[in-house]
Image (cartoon, rainbow, N blue to C red):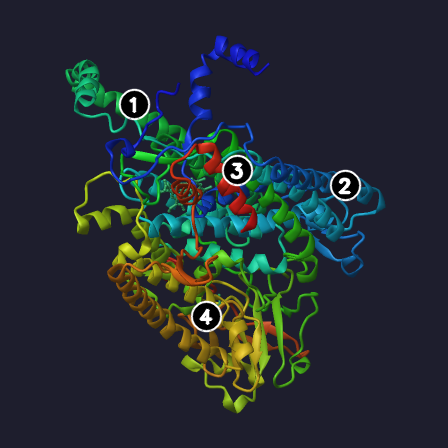
Amino acid sequence: MTRKLFQWFDERLGAASFARKTLRKVFPDHWSFLIGEIALYSFIILVITGTFLTFYYVPSATTVVYHGPYRPLDGQQMSEAFASVMRISFQVKLGLLFRQIHHWAALVMVGAVALHAARVFFTGAFRKPRDLNWVLGVVLLTLTIGIGVFGYSLPDDLLSGTGLRVIYSIVLSIPVVGTWLAFLVFGGAYPPPDLLERLFVLHVMILPGAIAAVLGLHLAMVWRQKHSNYPGKGLNDGLIRGERAWPRYAFKATGLFVAVFAVLALLAGVFQINPVWVYGPYSGYIASSGAQPDWYAGWLEGLVRLFPAWEFRGFGYEIAEPFFPGILLPGVFFTIMGLWPWIERRFTKDQRIHNVLQYPREVPLRTAIGVGAIAVVVMLSIAGGSDVLASYLGLNIEAATKVMRALVIVVPLLAFAVAYLIARELKQSGVHPVRRSSMLTVRRAPSGGFVYEEVERGGFKSVEERLEEAHEAAGGAAGGAAGGGTDLEEQHA
Amino acid sequence: MSDEQHEGPSGDGGPAGPTSVEGPVGEPSLPPEVERRAARWIGFALAVSMLAAIGLFVSYVLGNQVQVQGVLLALALGGIAMALIMWAKKLFVPEVVTEERGDHPAGERELEAVAAAAAPGGEAIARRPFLARMLGGAAGLLGLSVLLPVVRSLGPSPGRSLFTTDWSRGALLVDEFSRPLKASDLEIGSVATVFPQGFVGSESSMAIVLRVPQGLLNLPDGRDADAPDGVVCYSKLCTHAGCPVGLYEKLYYQLQCPCHFSAFDVLNGAEPVFGPAPRPLPQLPIEIDDAGYLRAKGGFTATPGPGFWNRGSGP
Ligand code: HEM
Ligand code: FES
C-alpha cells in the first residue's frame, strides 16, 4: 500500500530518495529547540483563526448605529469595523472563541519568538554558518511585533485608537521624509479616511505574506544546515546526533502542535481577552489613561514615555521628539541585534564553522550582554505601565517616571554585572547550575552493613543522555533492551 | 542498509561510548504489561477527545457559550495531543543516531568547479560592459516608471493641510453635541471640549476651554486679552504625539495628557511642565459676544499637534 503510493509519486516526481532522506533525517532533541516550533505552530494557528475572522470583519470607519444582542451598546454610534467585531463576538458561532484564540496566539507567538531568539543568542547558535539565518530571525521578530500592533488596532475600539494616533505621529516625526511618508502610508492627515482599510491589508496580506516568505527561508536554512547540537560525548562540529524524523519525532512534533492549539483554546475559553465591548468604540476626543498595549509593545510604549522632551530646530526645520524613542532607538536596537554575529566575530576573530552549541556559562561576556539587553526591555516594559504602577504604589506619576528613568539604566547594568560574575564563577568551577553533580545516599546492604552510593541527581537531561546512560548501564547490550529500560525509567519519573 | 549511518568515534576506540543506539523502530520491545498500560491511556485520551467533540456539536445547538466551547475544544485537541505524544514516547522505541553532517561546505574543488561554471557567462557579460549597464538602466527605469505613480497615489500631498484648522474669526465654540457655549456655562475649575461650529469632530481644531481665576492668568505676549474673564482656550492635541489632552488637575491648574503624561501649565500659556511634550499647547484667542457666547478671534497661536520636519514653515 505505502509502496504503491511511493511508486506513484516516484514515477512522476522521482521523489522516492527525497522521501527516504526526509523520513530518516536526524533531528537533535532538546526542550529548548521546541520554542522555535511553538512559534511556528502559533503562526499556523494565527493564520487558521485569522482567516476565519476575515469572513466577518469589515474594515470600515463608516458610522453605523449598533443594534444587537449586547444591550449596553444598543443604539450607540460606532464604526462599521467595531460593529463587525461586536457581531463576531456575540452572533457568529464560535466567533468569540476564535477571536480570543487569535489574540492569545498572538501573545504566545511573540513570546515564543522572543524566547527562541534568546535561546539562539545564549547558546551561540547564531555563529557561522547560522549567522545568515539569525538575520532572517531578526527580520521575523520585527515583522511579528508589527503584525501584532496593527492587528490590535483593527477593532477600532477606544484603546487601540489612541495607539494608532501615536504611531502616526511617530511616522510623521521622521526627519525630511516623515510628512510625506505619513501621508503616503496612512493616506492623509490624521485621521486618514481609509486608515482601517490600509491596516487591514497590512495585517492580513502584506505582513503575513512577508512572514510566510521569510519563515519559509528560515526553515529551509535550518533544514539545509541541519540543527545544531548541545555538546555531547563524542560529538564534534562534523557530526549530528538526534532522532530520525519518522516516526517518533514526527508524532511528538504533531502532538506539540495540537497541544499548543489545545492550550490556546483553553486560554481563550477561560480567560477573556480584549473585551472591546467594555472599552466602547473609538472616539477622537476621548482618550482613556487605562490604555495598555499588548505586552510586546510595552517596551516601545515605555521608551516613548521616558524619553525627554527633546526637539531640535534649525534652519526652519525640526526633528520632532517622537522620532528618537519611536524610530531611532528601536532601530539601533534591532540593527545591533541583527549585526551581532559580526560584532562578536570582530572581537573573537573566530572564523570557524560551529555546529556544537555553547552553554551560556561558557561565554560570560556574551551572556552578560544578553541579560543586560533583556533587562533593558523588561524595565522599559514596566515603564510602559508606569501609570498603573504609580497608582498601585501610591506614587505620583512624575515621581514614578523619574524613578523609572534611573532604573532603566541602573538595573540593566546591575543585571549585566551579576550575570557576568555568575557565569564566570560557573565556568571556572565547572559546576552545573541546575543539575547537582552528585549526592550521597546510604542504603542497607543485604549483608547487614551500610553502603554509601553516589547518585546522580536528575536535572534536565536529554533523551540521548538518558539513553547513553542506560546503554552504559546495560554494558552496551542490545539497543532494544536499553531502549526499553529508559522507557520504564520515564514512566516512573 | 543506510549509507549515512555512521558508527561514530566509538569505532576509534575512544571513551566516547556508543553513538548509535537503534531499536527496531515501530516494533515495540517494551514489556507487554507496560505496553498494555500505555495503550490503555492513549485510548482513554482519544475517547476523551471524541466525547469533547460530540459535546461541541451539542454546544452549537444550545447556544454560544465561549467558556464551555473553549474547554471542550481544548479537551478535543488536548486528547489528540496527549495520544500522539504518549504514542511517541511509550509505543515507539527511542533511537539516537549519530551521523556525519554531510556535504557542506563543499570544499576547494567544488568551489573551483562552480567558479569555472560561472566564468563563461561572466566573461561574455564583461565583454559588453556598456550593454550590461544599459540593461540595468532599462530595468531600473521601467521599475521607477511603474512604481512612482503607484506610490504617489497612495496619499494626497501634505500641502498646507497640517497648518490649517477649521477655526476662523467669529466661529462659535460648540461642544461635541453642537451646542454653543456661553461663558457663564463655565465655572471656575470646569473644562469643556469644543469645536468650531459646523466642524464637530474635526481633529485638528479640537480645543479645550476652561475658566480659571482671572488674576492668576499669566499668559505670554500679552495674550491675556484673548482669555476674557479667565476663560482660556487651548488646542486639545498633545504637542507630543497628538493624543487628546483630556485630564485636568484643578488643584495645580494643569492639563495632562493620558498617553505619556505630559503636563501643561494652564496659567502660563500651557507651557509643558512635565513629560515628553516639547512645546506648549497653542492657544485659541477667544472673545465673549453680546449674547454671552464664546467665539474665536482667529486661529491657534501656532500649528497644533505633534512636531514634524517642516512645521517651522507654518504660521
Ligand atoms: C516568526 C518567528 C520565528 C519562527 C516561527 C522560527 C522558527 C524556527 C524553528 C522551528 C527553528 C528550529 C527549531 C529551533 O531551533 O528552535 C528555528 C531555528 C533557528 N532560528 Fe528561528 N524562528 C523565528 C524567529 C527567529 C528569530 C527572532 C531568531 C533570532 C533573532 C531566529 C534564529 C534562528 C536560528 C539561528 C536558528 C537555528 C538554530 C540552531 O540550529 O540551533 N529565529 N527557527
Ligand atoms: S501624546 Fe501626549 S504625552 Fe505623548
> Mark 3 touching mark 1, by CB under 8 A?
no
Mark 1 vs 4: CB contact within 8 A:
no
Cα distance between the residues tagged 2 and 3: 24 Å
Sequence-wise first label, 1 or 4:
1
Local secondary structure at mark 3? helix
Q: Position of residue A224 (x, y in %)?
A: 36, 30
Q: Residue at x 18, y 13 (%)?
A: B120
As rendered, which of A314 and B31 lies closer to the eye?
Answer: B31
Asked if ligand 1 lies within 8 A of label 1, the reply is no
Mark 1 = which residue? B138
Using the numbered discs, state the Cα–Cα distance from disc 4 to disc 2 in whole angstroms: 70 Å
Ligand 1 is in which quadrant of the figure? top left
Taking depth in this image into account, of A187 and B106 the one nearest to the observer is B106
Q: Three-letter amino acid code at disc 1? A: Ala
Dots 4 and 2 on the same chain: yes
Whether callout 1 and callout 4 share a subunit is answered yes
Give the spatial CA distance, label 3 vs label 4.
64 Å
Q: Quadrant of the N terminus of chain A?
A: top right
Q: Secondary structure at mark 2?
A: helix
Residue to which mark 4 is pinned: B301
Q: Is residue A80 above or below residue A2?
A: below
Which of disc 2 and disc 1 is earlier in sequence? 2
Query: What type is the residue that disc 2 sits on?
Result: Leu
Name the residue that disc number 3 marks: A253
Residue B269: in sight, yes or no? no
